[in-house]
Image: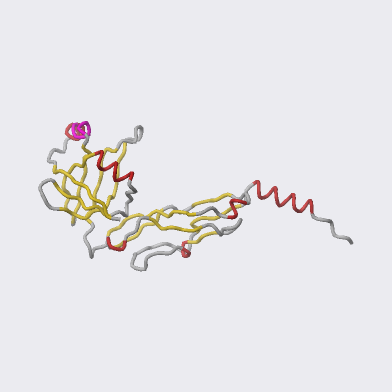
């Protein structure tokens, strides 16, 4: 998913300068391309619009500078005020085609597990996975259909449909999600046993 954004170069590094930028509706940012860091700023409203449009860490952005030129980048980190949630700083990382970038992609569970409909509890253990990938092989999320999961069933890491061009290092075959027994399912099982006719001896 490729998006577009305009940035402006900045030279001042002091906290007061960053504060003035934020007050003016500009988010201070770093643009890191081939190991070189450049100070830039992006319009807060424009960036929030991208976030609301579905921006993820795996989204490739065409980042243009006010002085001309552009870079294909991904968002490596967003720093927020812990109290207000306001965006304080962004790190953009160059995503040159042919070179792999290391990012995290979210794992999204889709559907309602039949085990949950029976009263089971859905447990989602692994929500992101770190990969190295070329920009052209990136995707927004890894989607997992859990509709057929019954109580006691699990989705393992090896069950995920992953791009064969990704570099991933995961130890073993961990559980991504499962439908566990809950008090409700335990109660139902107890009631069923109590209702079953006793065997004649």
Q: Dividing the picture into quarters, in which one does residue 102 lie?
A: bottom left
Q: Position of residue 174 (x, y in %)?
A: 48, 60
Image point (51%, 54%), residue name: 111
Q: Is residue 162 left or right of residue 7?
A: right
Colouring convention used in this rendered image of the protein: secondary structure
Q: Quadrant of the C terminus?
A: bottom right
Image quarter (top left, top right, bottom left or bottom right) of the N terminus: bottom left
Q: Could you say where residue 141 lies in the image, as x and y percent from the top left?
A: 38, 56
Q: Position of residue 148 (x, y in %)?
A: 56, 59
11 or 197: which is nearer to us? 197
Vertical comparison of 128 with 90: above or below: below
Residue extending furthest right?
201
Q: How many marks?
A: 0
Q: Whole-percent x and y of residue 131?
A: 34, 60
Q: Is residue 21 magenta?
A: yes
Residue 198 magenta-drawn?
A: no
Which residue lies most toward the bottom here? Answer: 164
Most common SS among magenta residues? helix
Magenta residues span: 20-24
The one of 63 and 168 positioned closer to us in this rendering: 63
- Most distant residue in the left direction: 67
Residue at image location 25% in from the left, 44% down from the top: 90
């Amino acid at each position: 998913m490729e998006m577009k954004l305009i940035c402006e170069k900045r030279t001042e590094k002091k906290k007061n300068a960053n504060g003035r930028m934020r007050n003016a509706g500009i988010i201070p940012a770093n643009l890191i391309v081939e190991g070189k860091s450049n100070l830039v700023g992006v319009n807060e409203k424009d960036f929030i619009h991208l976030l609301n449009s579905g921006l993820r860490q795996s989204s490739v952005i065409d980042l243009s500078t006010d002085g001309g030129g552009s870079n294909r980048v991904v968002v490596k980190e967003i720093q927020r005020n812990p109290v207000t949630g306001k965006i304080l700083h962004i790190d953009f990382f160059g995503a040159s085609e042919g070179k792999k970038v290391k990012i995290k992609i979210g794992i999204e569970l889709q559907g309602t597990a039949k085990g949950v409909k029976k009263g089971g509890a859905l447990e989602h253990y692994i929500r992101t996975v770190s990969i190295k990938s070329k920009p052209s092989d990136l995707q927004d999320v890894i989607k997992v259909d859990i509709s057929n999961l019954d109580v006691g069933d699990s989705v393992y890491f090896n069950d995920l449909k992953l791009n064969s061009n990704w570099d991933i290092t995961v130890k073993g075959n961990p559980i991504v999600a499962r439908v566990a027994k809950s008090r409700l399912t335990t109660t139902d099982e107890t009631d069923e046993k109590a209702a079953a006719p006793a065997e004649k001896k």
